[in-house]
Each structure stands twice: as C-alpha cells, then as structure tokens.
Amino acid sequence: MQDTIFRVFVVALGLITYPREDPMVEEWDNVIPVDIQEHEDKLLWEREKLEQDMTPTSQEDTLEMASTDWEDHYLWYIWNTFSIISMIRFLRKYVRRSSHKKYGDDDISEDSLFSVKSISGEVPLPDSDTLQRFHSKCIKNDKRWREDEFLEGFADDLLEAMRAVTDRNGSMVIEDFQMVKDVCDIIIPFTPPEPYSFQCHLWTNQTCGMTPDMQLCGKIKMVENVKIQNGCPCTSSNAGDDVVCLLHCENDNVKSEITDVYNGLLCMKDTPFLSKSHVTKWFQGTVRDAWAQISHKYEFELNFRNSDAPGALVVRFKSGKTITFNMNPVVKLNSEAYFLITAHSSDMLWTLNVSIYEDRLLHHLSKSLPENSCHIQILEIAYFLHKRQTALTGGSALKNIHFKNTLMHLLLTKAATQWHPDNMACRLRDLLVLVEKSLRQKLLHHFLVGNPSTQKYIELPDALSHAKPVNLFLPLVAHDCLYTNALVHFHEMLKNTCMLIEDYVPSKYSLD
C-alpha cells in the first residue's frame, strides 16, 4: 500500500515538474549535465538500498495484517453462527411455550404421557363383594323409579296440551312419546302435515373436528307428494275427498311425484332441509303454551334450564327439590332409529340415535349370560365413577358412550361364563384396561355401525350394517389437547376409584 502511494506521488510530481506540453523540454532531451547525471545515479542507488531494507519489514507486516484479518473474519463468523443458533433455540422455546399455553396442556406433552406406563392393570380395585355392596347402596335405589313414574304421567298430560296447541296453529304433528328411563329422556317424534313428509339422508362423517355424536348424522329434507294433473278436476289439489269422478274409478292409480319444498315450514332459508334452530324455537314455544294451559293443575314450576337445547327442563317443587329431564323432538328414520338435535354442529346436521338397536343387542346378549350377571352393574359403576371425577376436575372428551361401547365389545368377545357375579372385580378391570388402551390408541369403533358380527344377533338397516366403522375417539386424533385432558381425567379417575368406593362402603378387610 505504501509502495503504491509512493509511486503515485512520484508520477504526479514528475508530471507537475516536467510537463510534456512545455516546448522547452524537447531542447533538453539530449542535453544532460554531468552533475545532474551523477546526482541521479546516487539517488537511484540510495533508493535501491532503501527498498532492500524495507522489503522484509513489509512482508512481515503483510503477514501480520493477513493473520489479523483472518482472525477478525474467523471471529466474525463464529459470533454470527453463535448468534443464529441462539436465536433459533430461543424461537423454538418460545413457540413451544406458546403452544402449551394455547392448548392448556399444563406443561404435559404427549411424549411424556406415553412415557407413563398403563396404570389400569395395576391400580388397586375393591373385591367383587365390596363392589356389589357399593352398587346396591349407591346406585341401585328406588329414587329413580319414583322419578320416572312421575315424569311419565306428567309428560302424558303435557303432550296432550302440546297437541292441542299444534292443532290450533296448524304446525307440525306431534306423535306419541317414548320414555328412555335410564337418562330421564322423553322422545317426541313429529311429522309435517299432509301432503308433506320428511326424507332422511344418512351419512357417516369421519371428519376429525367432529364430536363423536356427530360422526353418525344426516340431513332431513322436506318433500311434497304432488299429483300430476291429467286435465280432470278430480286430480286437482282443491278437490276434496267427497268428490266423485264419473270418468275415473277409485281403482285407477293417480300419478304423483315427489318434489323438494324450499323455504318450507321450519326449513332453512332457500333450502328444503330442516333447521335445528327453527325446530328448537318452535318446540320451546309449544311447550310454553302447553304449560300455560295446564300449570294450574300442578303445584310446582316448570322452566328451561338451557336455551340452546330444545327441551332441557327442570321441575322445581316448593320444598326446593328439583327433577331434571329432557323432552327431545325427533324425526324417525324408522321405527327403531331417529334423528335428534345436538349442539356444536351445522344447523342442517342431525345426530342419528341408535340406542334402541343398542339396547336390543344388549338384551339379546344378556339372555346367554349367567343369572344375576354383573355386566350392567359394571357399566353403572363406571358411569358413577366418571360422574364423580367430572364433578371434581371438570368435563373431558371421555363420555358415557365410550364406556358403553367398551362394555359391548367385551360382551361380544368374552365367554358368557366369565360374567358371573363373583367375577365383577375382574370384569371391571377388563373394562378399565380396554378404555385406557383405546384412549392411548385414539381408536374405539362403535360396536354397531359397520360391524358385521352383530348381524347374527339382531337385524340392522343396510345403512348401518354396510357403513364404514365409526371411530368414537376420532376427535382426539386432531386435537392433542382433548387427548391429553381425556387421558389425565381417566388416570385421575382410576387413582380415586378405590378410595371413593371405600368411602361409601368400607371393605371387609378394613372392617376387620
């Protein structure tokens, strides 16, 4: 660098001192005085000596500068690499913490859950005798029977008043109700007035975001049976039943066609499909009008406990006692299955309920079991434990439907002799082990839908027997937070089982 500057300086000085444009220079090109020549040679000799002395030093400085530059570049790369790695680690930690806060996992990851071994096979359970005494004391009582008897009589009176209301305003036709005594549900089928009718379109939905009850659902279309006009007044829609046609006898078949009814009664706007929200509003209004007609006969209050559900009712006596029950408006698929209203889904999707087929299969399997078999007691104990745990820690994705389906799978696979009352503790453990296994695998198929083995016990519609199997744990596949909460809820229930049962019924060993 210094050499370059020196050369540039010499050239510039020469150009300034001896300009080529000066005409007097040409005269002096060939005339060089002797003293000047000697002085120039001396300068050249001193310059060469100076360059020889400076050359090693310049090389050393160059090497030192190159080494310094290399060290600076090396440190710069190391520092930037370290900064990038630190930034990546910081971002990963921040994103992971944000995802845990978003889903409320309580710092419990799925990997840590899988690292915990299954506890359903090792958790202590009471013996069969203690379980039987617990069931007799806490679950099997006459209170539910008395409530069902009261509700059946009250529902019959209320339903007659509801029919009077619908007949007066010309809305839907209400049919005879059906009592589901296990859960205090009253099923009330309804149909449109003639010439309208419903067409049910069943489909099995395997979308991960759907709840278990919505994986088997369908749409309900309102249609009209329209007679095809042939020019005769007897086929006119205005012709009454008392019109006698002399051209056509009664045996002549009148042609008709089925057409969709858009914007029909209780249908969604610009569609022929029945709206759950419209049906809910109509049903609640009908119940209020009917209760206003018969309330003077009773000494209690009747109120809705959930505005989103069509018939979630509560009876409140003056003594403060309450009885809760549900009146569900349903649309029949056939004589055994029906569609009902559930929340958190599309306004056009109705849940298919196949509980009658389930109860029929359970009744058929019970005939081959030993006398006083323990399968019903086991299911009711599981319901009780799940209900208590829900009261302690809140709800989860684990529902009663999962325990019932697990029991049915056990009944279809285990020998009938294994359901003796003395085996209650063993069968309860089998139920809990299978529930935990299904939870971990996120897989529990509905025992009726798409299960050919049930055909040898009961007759099912082709839409159910030939449908794809429905995974009741499918929502857990898409939502890790639901899976985590359900597994933690179940493990807490297992840990509290023995203590909870012995609080109600001490075991014979503790009494000793």
Image: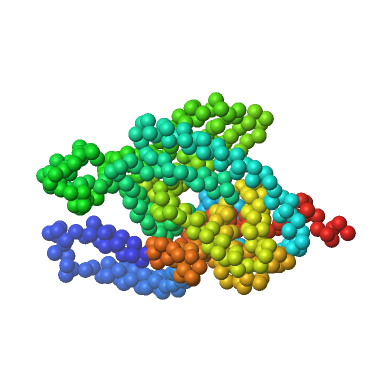
Which residue is found at the position 47% from the left and 56% from the top?
354
The C terminus lies in quadrant = bottom right
Color style of the picture: rainbow
Image coordinates for residue 426, horizontal then vertical, percent = 69, 67
Image coordinates for residue 66, horizontal then vertical, percent = 45, 69
Please, which residue is most extreme toward the right here?
512
Image coordinates for residue 221, horizontal then vertical, percent = 32, 48
Q: Nearer the viewer, residue 291 or 391?
A: 291
Q: Is residue 91 left or right of residue 202?
A: right
Q: Nearer the viewer, residue 436 or 335?
A: 335
Image coordinates for residue 65, horizontal then vertical, percent = 46, 66
The N terminus lies in quadrant = bottom left
Whether residue 230 is visible to the viewer of this picture, yes or no, is: yes
Q: Nearer the viewer, residue 51 or 213?
A: 213
Which residue is found at the position 55% from the left and 56% from the top?
401
Q: Up-down: is 24 above or below 329?
A: below
Whether residue 406 is visible to the viewer of this picture, yes or no, is: no
Q: Up-down: is 312 above or below 473?
A: above
Which residue is found at the position 38% from the left and 40% from the top?
173
